[in-house]
Image: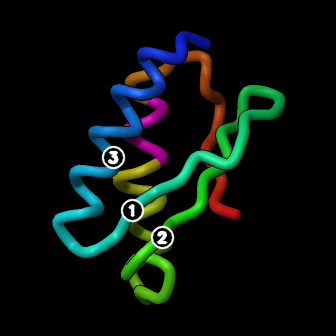
Amino acid sequence: MDNEALDKVIQKVREGLKAEGGDVEVVGLKNDVLYVRLLGSCETCPMSGLTMKNWVEKTFMDALPSIKGVKAV
């Protein structure tokens, strides 16, 4: 995977999350699944599941076709 492309997507996701007081950390990549941790206000937000599916996962998978899934840890 292209690290520069990954960094660009991380920044895009962060911009969206930081608007609400949150952040994201990439934990690792295994078998084409990207593992991330939601931080800040996203950690305790009751909407974090929707944010994960509708923003974080979608943004990563749209921009990086080699990613087959995104999981929160």
Q: Mark 2 or 1 closer to N-term?
A: 1
For residue 70, which quarter of the picture? top right
Residue denoted by label 3? 13
Residue 66 coordinates in the image, percent (x, y): 60, 17
Judge whether 44 appears above or below 2 on screen: below
Left or right: 57 with respect to 35? left
Magenta stretch: includes residue 59: yes
Q: Are marks 2 and 1 in contact (CB under 8 Å)?
A: yes
Counting from the top left corner in percent of width and height, residue 67 is at 61, 26
**Element at label 3:** helix
Q: Residues within 10 Å of mark 3 (few under 14, many from 20)?
A: some
Residue 2 percent location from the top left of the image: 54, 10
Q: Position of residue 39 (x, y in %)?
A: 48, 70
Task: Please indicate whether residue 47 sits to the left or right of residue 28 in the image.
Answer: left
Q: Which residues are magenta?
A: 57-61
Q: Residue at x 37, y 32 (%)?
A: 9
Image height of 58 relative to 23, above or below: above
Residue 22 part of the magenta-drawn span:
no
Inter-mark Cα distance, 2 to 1: 5 Å
- Please tell me the numbered disc located at residue 43: none
Q: Residue at x 46, y 57 (%)?
A: 24
Residue at the spot of label 1: 23
Quarter of the picture containing the N terminus is top right
| Amino acid identity at mark 2 | Leu
Kind of residue at badge 1: Asp
